[in-house]
Amino acid sequence: MAYSKNYYLKSKRTFTTVRKYAWLFTILVAFGGLWEPKLGLFVLLVMAGLMITSFFTGRYWCGNICPHGSLFDRLLLSYSRNVKIPSFLNSKIFIALFFVFFMYNFTRRILNSFTAWGTYDFFDKLGFVLVVTYLVVFIVGGVLAVLFAPRAWCQFCPMGTIQKAFHGLGRLLRITKITEKKLTISAQDKCLMCGKCSKVCPFQLTPHFSFLDNNQFHNINCIKCSTCIENCPKGILSLQTEESCSKTA
């Protein structure tokens, strides 16, 4: 499929209070943590939160709670070229290699901070590792957001990879069938095939080509941000669980 320079639309993506202001947490940790490293310890709560929620709801955290996601969508969308994200950034090989590279360095730094275990400096050292990590994502993700699209970093984000792994476990245990709300079309015959749901998708997914079983969009990278729902000209999109959709089919 060919994409013109102006194919993707800079549609408003901020719908909830959390999503609107979560970027403040990124600023606080990435920059405030340079003076008060213990602020980085709050990132541990973020990591725990995204892993727990992904088990039940897939990448919902990315689209509704993630502080960096809020930064990309809320502040950088206006400055972004918003063009097609390079395909290599979401290739399985690149995602796997970057995950190994990132986790190796992250783990090495975490283990190094434990050399200060039992001392007053331990929590500062541990927190600083997380601060630097947040700052790196801010810089690299920010540059990619401006050069390509706001969610370019999210294509290969290591935390996103971890979420997909936990989501896979939830699917294996058939938990997500009850708990995960997926993009759902109420009536395919009413769809205009205008492609607006794809044009406004932060992840540049293509829902209008992909509704299959139970009229649902099953792409694991859908972040359930509701942008496509808000922009559908026919108002036929919503978020529903697979189980509830099966009952109404």
Image (tube, rainbow, N blue to C red):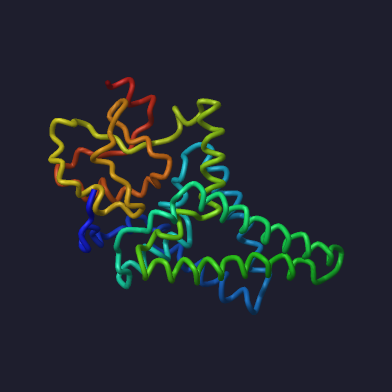
Task: Pinpoint residue 205: horizontal percent, then vertical percent.
Answer: 32, 47
User: Of all residues shown, which one is farthest toward the right?
Assistant: 118
Nearer to me, 114 or 91 = 91
Numbered circles on residues, count: 0
Q: Residue at x 23, y 40 (%)?
A: 208
Nearer to me, 75 or 82 = 82
Specify the quadrant that holds the C terminus: top left
Task: Pinpoint residue 48: horizontal percent, then vertical percent.
Answer: 61, 49
Q: Residue at x 49, y 68 (%)?
A: 140
Task: Pinpoint residue 162: horizontal percent, then vertical percent.
Answer: 56, 46
User: Of all residues shown, which one is farthest toward the bottom?
Assistant: 35
The answer to which quarter of the image holds residue 109 is bottom right
Q: Residue at x 25, y 38 (%)?
A: 209
The answer to which quarter of the image holds residue 215 is top left
137 vs 221: above or below: below
Task: Pinpoint residue 127: horizontal percent, then vertical percent.
Answer: 69, 66
197 vs 188: above or below: below
48 vs 166: above or below: below
Relative placement, left or right, of 134 versus 224 is right
Relative placement, left or right, of 110 versus 11 is right
Relative placement, left or right, of 244 versus 93 is left
Q: Residue at x 47, y 41 (%)?
A: 58
Relative placement, left or right, of 179 versus 148 is right
